[in-house]
Image (cartoon, helix red, strand yellow):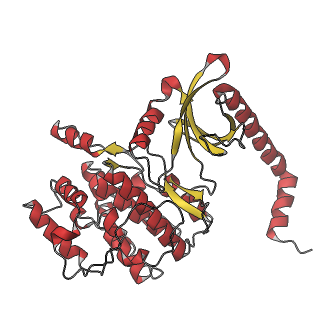
Amino acid sequence: MNMNLQELNTMKRRLFGGDKDHEGKRSKQEDWTKHAQKMYGDGAAWVRGVMIGKGSFGYVFIANLKNDKSRYSLYPPVMAVKSAEVSASGSIQKEKEVMDNINGCPYVIKCFGEEITNGESGRMVYNMLLEYGSGGTLADAIKSSNGKGLPELDVRRHARSILRGLSHIHKRGYVHCDLKPQNVLLVANEGKTGGFVAKIGDLGSAKKMKQMKKNKMNNYGPCWRGTPMYLSPEALVNGVQEQPADVWAVGCIVFEMLTGKPLWYSNQDLGVNEMISDGRDLFSGSSSLSAEGRSFLEKCLCRKVMCRLTANMLLKHPFLKGLHDDDIDEIEESHEVFDINTITSSSWFSDDDELWLSSCSEDEDVDVTANGESINARFHEVRRFPVRL
């Protein structure tokens, strides 16, 4: 008798109680969700739905409007709500403050507000209402590729969205500190193009640049936050986690989208000395990368901070050329065309880029004697590819 693999697995579950175990787990999850709904309560205009995530901060639930047909509602019909008891909600409230300071970018998850709900036994719960990523996370999309990676067109489109969001975050004076596929959500695009738009979420680890410089002046010891697999060499060794560290993480994400595997997947036993080497060495033998994709990664995964491009600069890289607009409210961008061989370093670098260089000048890997010299060195590094602004 011929049976396919699916039929064999179904028979095994029936013989060994697999179906019952699965049903039991699902039943327990449903029971826990109902318990959490009572424990955390509903909002004035929304009802708490199923749990879709959890972390050290608390839990994330679906939130549905009680009257989704109202024209006057400030909320969309479906949201995500991040919740924790008021006494333990410090990290969520801090994230809310960050999101208020960086609002206005269509490539960062929107925050619709906050609300205190009352659960059973008088429990007071703090809730932050967020845009819902109905397409899941970028990590889910990569996992569904079964190790093959995403189509390069999707990678380019998602990379552009992430960089647009990151550029906005950096312009507002923040460092994300925990960029990874799990923290990039795919939100349904309501424009003509349809599909999903990648948006940066989870800003609970974000730090303000001014505060980081103040900590330096007070001689606080080095420390980093985020996920080790996506940390830059300077963060691992010196605890320096500034805007270039986010760009390193973007390189890790793009590599993972292209190959279906994390950058350190085949190098899990490496020590710190190997991990702080150029990330470019890790993909040098990958034949599946296009020339533009390889060049893009080289600009992100450079060990020397001064040679790593900014988010703004990467948006002009040839790897991201020729993409259609997402049909959402765009950030204003310059459409002037320059010849990179005729422009001067002062016309190429923005004030943000000079701030980046000056903030990195204390790094021991960066041999810089003056800010002007560092800009010129950076400019020569960038001349390797043509740019359209």
Residue 101 visible in the shown view: yes
Question: Residue lying farthest top?
Answer: 121
Q: Position of residue 301 (x, y in %)?
A: 33, 67
Quadrant including the N terminus: bottom right
The answer to which image quadrant residue 381 occupies is bottom left
Depth order, front residue of 117/283: 117
Q: How many marks do you count on the picture? A: 0
Q: Position of residue 216 (x, y in %)?
A: 19, 41
Residue at the (26%, 55%) spot, across then down: 234
Q: Is residue 44 above or below residue 163?
A: above
Q: Is residue 104 above or below residue 218?
A: below
Quadrant including the C terminus: bottom left
Depth order, front residue of 350/183: 350
Residue 377 visible in the shown view: no
In this rendering, position of residue 206 left or right of residue 156: left
Q: Position of residue 145 (x, y in %)?
A: 61, 69
Question: Residue lying farthest front?
Answer: 71
Q: Position of residue 143 (x, y in %)?
A: 59, 63
Q: Is residue 193 above or below residue 12?
A: below
Residue at the (34%, 63%) spot, across then down: 311
Q: Is residue 222 above or below residue 377?
A: above
